[in-house]
Image (spheres, rainbow, N blue to C red):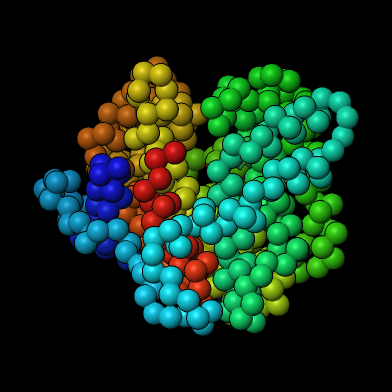
């Protein structure tokens, strides 16, 4: 844990500058989404123009970021990194609007706070997915209650925090509870499909559906779970919520598609990586946070806070996921698996390492496909501070998530969402 903490708290001057550049170009605060929200969903032409402007700004800022990075990193060793005071430390000690003091750790523990609402989640999902045949076995196999339920937990806490902000009554609505199930079903459907795309053997410590039942049944089971989630969504009878989720599903697919491509230009590559990260992981979290705020009848500015919290925590979650691929010992040899490199993917640690070791460029472009590429890339990452840089970036996104959620009235759930930002940074699986 101490190692993880130091890993996650490590940051330095050049990182600060680097992320300042990212922030300035809107990646941390999602300014493009705000522009789009203000204007409603843009036409394809408008979206193209906004996208092009946004992209131009990103390239410019990332060029600046790279210059600052290269000018200041050359002789700094990772052990000279400046460390944060501790973690993201946050405590609400005042009596809040619900007339309770909730500064103790247990009260802020996100999993404990959400546990009553989460305890029947998987049973309820299995009931929704009631069918006969292999499909039932596959669904039961995946919804075995062993997932972290990270997304439903955020949704439940966000729903209560928004309700309390809006009406001083935090009680979760039935429709908001349904969003917890819907988000878990969409997430699981995407994992089943992802395992087919990657040809994965294991997931959550179990053999994958594609390895047991074959790829065709796995794809169909994913489709079935997705369509059941869509039926549950339609039953809520709220068009705004339906539209929010269709955006999330589109983003999931586009994000996965983006992952299949590479960019020649280094700056473009980083922008591409962060856009992919948002679409593949953060959009579903952001949009489900927004959905519960809509169902709680919150004003658009509160909906935007919920969305931005989900967006920032979601990007941080994925950045740490990418770090864990280099640091977490998942296999029997006790060595990190470098699964992403083996799949040809250049994630944060590699992209940052490439700024110190330009030799990585050729390996990235050929997606680590030549014998020895994976080992060599691994070595470069170890010699670089790519892991620390990625952790620092995740730290920045978490801070932005905290800044956003702190705009809501204080409540145990709001504090738990703040605490969650720390958990995201320090998680080791
Ligand atoms: C079928 C909706 C649908 C989409 C298909 C394949 C695809 C498009 C999208 C894949 C997106 C994907 C696999 C994202 C992975 C995000 C991620 C970091 C998952 C790991 O999440 P955890 O750690 O997993 O919360 P558990 O197992 O705990 O749920």
Q: Is residue 79 visible?
A: yes
Query: Is 157 in front, or is 265?
Result: 157
Residue shown at the point (39%, 69%) measured from the top left: 103
Q: Residue farthest to the front? A: 100
From the viewer's perspective, tell me whether residue 234 is left or right of residue 184: right
- Displayed-image quarter of ligand 1: top right
Residue shown at the point (71%, 51%) measured from the top left: 181
Q: Residue farthest to the right? A: 132
Q: Quadrant of the N terminus?
A: top left
Query: Could you say which quadrant of the image residue 227 lies in?
Result: top right
Q: Quadrant of the C terminus?
A: top left
Residue shown at the point (68%, 37%) measured from the top left: 143
Q: Position of residue 354 (x, y in %)?
A: 31, 41
Residue shown at the point (24%, 55%) measured from the top left: 11
From the viewer's perspective, tell me whether residue 95 is left or right of residue 120: left
Query: Is 21 in front, or is 186?
Result: 186
Where is 243 relative to 232, above or below? Answer: below
Query: Is 254 in front, or is 285?
Result: 285
From the viewer's perspective, tell me whether residue 344 is left or right of residue 64: right
Query: Is 424 in front, or is 260?
Result: 424
């Amino acid at each position: 844990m101490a190692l993880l903490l130091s890993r996650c708290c490590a940051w330095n001057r050049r990182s600060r500058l680097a992320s300042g550049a990212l922030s300035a170009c809107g990646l941390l605060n999602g300014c493009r989404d705000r522009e789009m929200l203000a204007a409603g969903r843009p036409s394809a032409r408008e979206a193209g123009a906004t996208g092009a402007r946004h992209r131009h700004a990103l390239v410019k800022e990332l060029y600046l970021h790279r210059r600052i990075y290269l000018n200041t990193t050359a002789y700094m060793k990772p052990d000279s990194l400046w460390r944060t005071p501790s973690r993201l430390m946050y405590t609400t000690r005042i009596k809040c609007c619900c007339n309770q003091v909730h500064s103790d750790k247990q009260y802020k523990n996100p999993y404990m706070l959400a546990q009553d609402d989460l305890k029947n989640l998987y049973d309820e999902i299995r009931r929704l997915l009631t069918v006969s045949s292999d499909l039932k076995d596959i669904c039961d196999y995946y919804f075995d209650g062993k997932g972290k339920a990270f997304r439903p937990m955020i949704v439940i806490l966000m729903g209560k925090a928004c309700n309390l902000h809006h009406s001083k009554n935090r009680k979760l609505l039935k429709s908001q509870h349904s969003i917890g199930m819907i988000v878990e079903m969409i997430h699981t459907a995407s994992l089943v499909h992802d395992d087919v795309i990657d040809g994965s053997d294991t997931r959550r410590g179990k053999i994958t559906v594609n390895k047991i039942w074959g790829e065709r049944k796995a794809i169909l089971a994913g489709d079935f779970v997705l369509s059941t989630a869509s039926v549950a969504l339609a039953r809520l009878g709220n068009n705004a919520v339906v539209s929010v989720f269709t955006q999330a599903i589109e983003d999931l697919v586009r994000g996965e598609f983006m992952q299949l491509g590479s960019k020649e230009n280094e700056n473009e590559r980083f922008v591409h990586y962060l856009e992919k990260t948002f679409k593949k992981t953060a959009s579903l979290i952001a949009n489900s946070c927004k959905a519960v705020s809509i169902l709680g009848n919150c004003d658009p500015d509160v909906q935007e806070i919920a969305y931005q919290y989900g967006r920032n925590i979601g990007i941080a979650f994925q950045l740490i996921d990418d770090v864990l691929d280099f640091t977490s010992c998942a296999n029997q040899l006790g060595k990190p698996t470098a699964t992403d490199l083996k799949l040809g993917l250049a994630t944060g640690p590699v992209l940052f390492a490439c700024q110190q070791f330009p030799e990585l460029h050729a390996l990235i472009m050929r997606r680590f496909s030549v014998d020895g590429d994976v080992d060599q890339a691994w070595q470069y990452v170890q010699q670089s501070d790519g892991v620390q840089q990625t952790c620092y970036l995740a730290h920045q996104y978490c801070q932005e998530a905290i800044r956003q959620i702190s705009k809501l009235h204080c409540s145990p759930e709001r504090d738990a969402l703040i605490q969650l930002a720390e958990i995201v940074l320090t998680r080791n699986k």
